[in-house]
Image (spheres, helix red, strand yellow):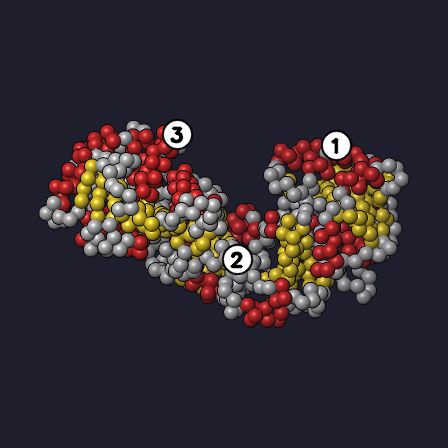
């Protein structure tokens, strides 16, 4: 690992907006004002909308100002953008807040304040009669105001909507509609309703939906979290700006915008739901940050995604790894580890267990693992550090001392290479990308990744051609483009095959290597040799690397590959140099249907392999689909095998109880089952045979593996020296 030290304080950098965190927490109000007694709080939230409650509250509270959601200082940057000094401003539910007074003192002198509490209006009149003679205070119900139409340029609310809308009962919703209707009535066309709120989900949905439907411009500002507002509330404070436009029946056009403190201009949103999700993301980020600041460490898995402000696409994903048991020096509280592009799918970076192992190796109590996303441009490690410096410190542990150096860690000191060669869509599997990445050993690899499951490499192949020059060329073409916008198809590749040959002799996937190693079980007596004839049915083509290896290295093999998705055959042929001939045939069909039809006694195979993914992400098993391991179907697989046949299954199951059921079903059909676990992966390979008579002892199995490997290493044919069949077979056991 290489590190670049980062000193506090850090400069905020990067135009980022926040999206939803996987950590869900509960929000609660808190206050640090010692003079607010517990008996002032309502017995139920409904009392917030009661006039009697507020009369009692202000009598007990006295004349001291009570600032819900922060002071004028917290909000002045936003207020000055939307309220002009000469505007006639109506403050609804003014309470005894100093907001109006502070605005008056800096030049806003056309302010009228109303409140339902006679007590607080009397207090405020007395407090301001001398110093602010033009300030108006009137006892009035905002649900039934006595002002004429279009009298104000601005209606200002700080917390009143939140106090009114304590639930979603019919009565409450009627009152909120009356409030909005009255505000709309007294505002001039072009006027602004400025609403300061915690924007709880039901409140934000109601307010945004109401004014968007009426054609008002909706803009939301996330208040910079400092000062009183951040001390009072775990959740962030928002300022809604609803600008009244003349309602045009049937227009249907909505203007919805989000403004974050780090953005120079508003971000236009496509829908009300999109705007609400952006707000929810910021709220969850604040909750997550608060949660992480308060806890010293935990085994809880926490992740957070930050999106680019221009494209709205994911730019960084943070994984927070806490290791309370790490015996590290006092200075090793916190570090940031940047995963090189394209390597986020590796076990060390792409799994909770792997990231914890990474944290133990780094010896920091909290490690923030940063993943870089495709379709984003990153200039250098230094640029990433500068961009992230203001963000990552939000996630630092509370025990981090002031002025403590926080290191950035990386592998090899660079950001890696990721070149998206092609982006396509399959009717069955959804969007996918073909991308070339630089591996840890400096070699380049091609990945097929379905965007529905970006943490899993569907197919992988080693490239014979060094793509670093082409990657550099593409980076040069894109450097003048705005960050986050993908390159055009013409920029990606005019000829996808040119100069980027695939090394078909190299099996990148360890589970494919294990499936090949298991072929030694096919022949008990003499052992399987490279020129031993056998027929094989493989369900699941992917990029075609597994069937291509079998075809090329077993010269007498006949391989039928069943693939349900025609697009995958096109991908394998175009991007992974897969080809068919008289010994290699692809059958475009549903594997379930094919085996049902084949189970007629007219066809049999020496080997049947399942390497097919499930599209159902709701189950704890991602390979194969559940229907492939049901009792009746497994019986059809058994019927399809020759007498000494072999069934090989790639099993990926994280649900322990489901795995037990699957194993019971398999052992109920196949008396002899071997298991090989893949180190560092969830994959487990099952080798299933028809009778216990085919049982092979460990010593014989290893000898058969060595014998097969020797026959596969033919002169003039490349053999990966890291692929040792005998070594792989040492971990095989009967279950």
Between residue 96 and residue 634, name the one nearer to us.
Answer: 96
Going 36% across and 50% down the picture, which residue do you hit? Answer: 243
Between residue 422 and residue 610, name the one nearer to us.
Answer: 422
Mark with earlier residue (2, 3): 3
Q: Is residue 236 left or right of residue 50?
A: right
Alpha-carbon neighbours of circle 1 within 10 Å: few (<14), some, or many (≥20)? some
Instruction: Give the CA separation, mark 2 to mark 3.
Output: 47 Å
Q: Is residue 480 left or right of residue 714?
A: left
Instruction: Give the CA separation, mark 2 to mark 1.
Output: 43 Å
Q: Is residue 389 left or right of residue 733?
A: left
Going 56% across and 70% down the picture, which residue do you hit? Answer: 477
Quadrant containing the C terminus in the rendered view:
top right
Mark with earlier residue (2, 1): 2
Residue 529, image x and y in percent? 84, 53
Q: Which residue position is annotated with label 1?
A: 631
Residue 159, image x and y in percent? 30, 41
**Label 1 residue SS:** helix
Residue 184, image x and y in percent? 33, 43
Q: Are marks 3 and 1 in contact (CB under 8 Å)?
A: no
**Label 3 residue SS:** helix
Label 2 or label 3, whichever lies nearer to me, is 3
Residue 372: image tag: 2
Mark with earlier residue (3, 1): 3
Q: Which residue position is annotated with label 3?
A: 170
Going 29% across and 33% down the picture, which residue do you hit? Answer: 48
Question: Among all residues in the image, which is located at the extreme right?
Answer: 602
């Amino acid at each position: 690992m290489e590190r670049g030290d980062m000193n506090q304080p850090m400069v905020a950098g990067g135009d980022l907006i926040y999206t939803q965190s996987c950590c869900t927490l509960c929000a609660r109000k808190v206050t640090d004002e010692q003079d607010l007694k517990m008996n002032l709080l309502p017995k139920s939230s409904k009392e917030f909308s009661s006039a009697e409650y507020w009369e009692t509250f202000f009598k007990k509270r006295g004349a001291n100002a009570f600032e819900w959601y922060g002071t004028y200082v917290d909000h002045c940057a936003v207020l000055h953008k939307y309220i002009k000094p000469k505007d006639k401003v109506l403050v609804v539910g003014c309470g005894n807040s100093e907001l109006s007074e502070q605005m008056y003192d800096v030049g806003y002198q056309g302010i009228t304040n109303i409140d339902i509490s006679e007590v607080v209006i009397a207090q405020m009149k007395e407090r301001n009669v001398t110093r602010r003679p033009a300030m108006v205070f009137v006892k009035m119900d905002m649900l039934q105001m006595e002002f004429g139409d279009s009298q104000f340029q601005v209606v200002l609310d700080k917390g009143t909507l939140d106090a009114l809308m304590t639930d979603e009962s019919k009565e409450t919703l009627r009152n909120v509609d009356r409030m909005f209707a009255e505000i709309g009535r007294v505002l001039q066309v072009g006027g602004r309703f400025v609403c300061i709120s915690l924007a709880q989900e039901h409140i934000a949905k109601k307010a945004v939906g109401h004014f968007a439907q009426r054609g008002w411009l909706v803009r939301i500002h996330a208040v910079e979290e400092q000062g009183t507002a951040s001390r009072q509330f775990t959740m962030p404070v928002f300022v809604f700006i609803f600008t009244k436009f003349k309602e045009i029946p049937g227009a249907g056009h909505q203007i919805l915008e989000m403004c974050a403190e780090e953005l120079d201009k508003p971000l236009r949103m496509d829908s009300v739901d999109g705007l609400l999700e952006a707000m929810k993301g910021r709220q969850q980020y604040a909750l997550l940050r608060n949660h992480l600041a308060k806890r010293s460490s935990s085994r809880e898995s926490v992740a957070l995604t930050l999106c680019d402000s221009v494209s709205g696409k994911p730019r960084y994903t943070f994984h927070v790894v806490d290791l309370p048991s790490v015996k590290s020096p006092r200075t090793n509280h916190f570090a940031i580890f940047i995963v090189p592009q394209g390597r986020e799918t590796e076990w060390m970076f792409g799994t909770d267990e792997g990231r914890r192992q990474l944290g133990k190796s780094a010896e920091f109590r909290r490690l923030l693992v940063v993943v870089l996303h495709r379709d984003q441009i990153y200039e250098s490690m230094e640029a990433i550090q500068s961009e992230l410096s203001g963000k990552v410190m939000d996630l630092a542990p509370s025990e981090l001392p002031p002025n403590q150096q926080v290191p950035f860690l990386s592998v090899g000191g660079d950001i890696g290479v990721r070149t998206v060669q092609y982006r396509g869509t399959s009717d069955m599997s959804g969007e996918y990308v073909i991308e070339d990445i630089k591996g840890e050993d400096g070699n380049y690899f091609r990945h097929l990744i379905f965007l529905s499951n970006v943490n899993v490499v569907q197919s992988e192949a080693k490239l014979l051609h060094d793509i670093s020059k082409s990657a550099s060329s593409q980076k040069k073409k894109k450097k003048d483009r705005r960050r986050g916008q993908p390159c055009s198809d013409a920029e990606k590749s005019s000829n996808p095959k040119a100069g980027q040959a695939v090394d078909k002799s190299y099996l990148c996937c360890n589970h494919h290597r294990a499936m090949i190693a298991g072929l030694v079980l096919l022949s008990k007596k003499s052992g399987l040799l490279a020129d031993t004839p056998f027929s094989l049915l493989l369900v699941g083509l992917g990029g075609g690397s597994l069937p291509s290896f079998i075809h090329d290295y077993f010269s007498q093999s006949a391989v039928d590959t069943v693939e349900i998705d025609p697009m995958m055959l096109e991908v394998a042929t175009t991007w992974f140099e897969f080809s068919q001939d008289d010994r290699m045939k692809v059958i475009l069909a549903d594997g379930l249907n094919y085996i049902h039809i084949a189970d007629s006694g007219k066809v049999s195979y020496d080997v049947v392999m399942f390497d097919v993914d499930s599209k159902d992400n709701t189950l704890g098993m991602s390979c194969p689909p559940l229907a492939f391991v049901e009792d009746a179907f497994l019986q059809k697989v058994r019927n399809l095998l020759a007498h000494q046949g072999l069934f090989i299954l790639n099993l990926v199951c994280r649900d322990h109880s489901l795995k037990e059921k699957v194993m019971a079903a398999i052992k109920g059909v196949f008396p002899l089952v071997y298991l090989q676990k893949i180190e560092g992966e969830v994959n487990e390979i099952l080798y299933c045979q028809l009778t216990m008579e085919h049982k092979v002892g460990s010593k014989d199995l290893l000898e058969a593996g060595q014998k097969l490997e020797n026959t596969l290493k033919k002169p003039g044919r490349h053999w990966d020296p890291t692929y040792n069949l005998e070594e792989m077979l040492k971990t095989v056991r009967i279950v």
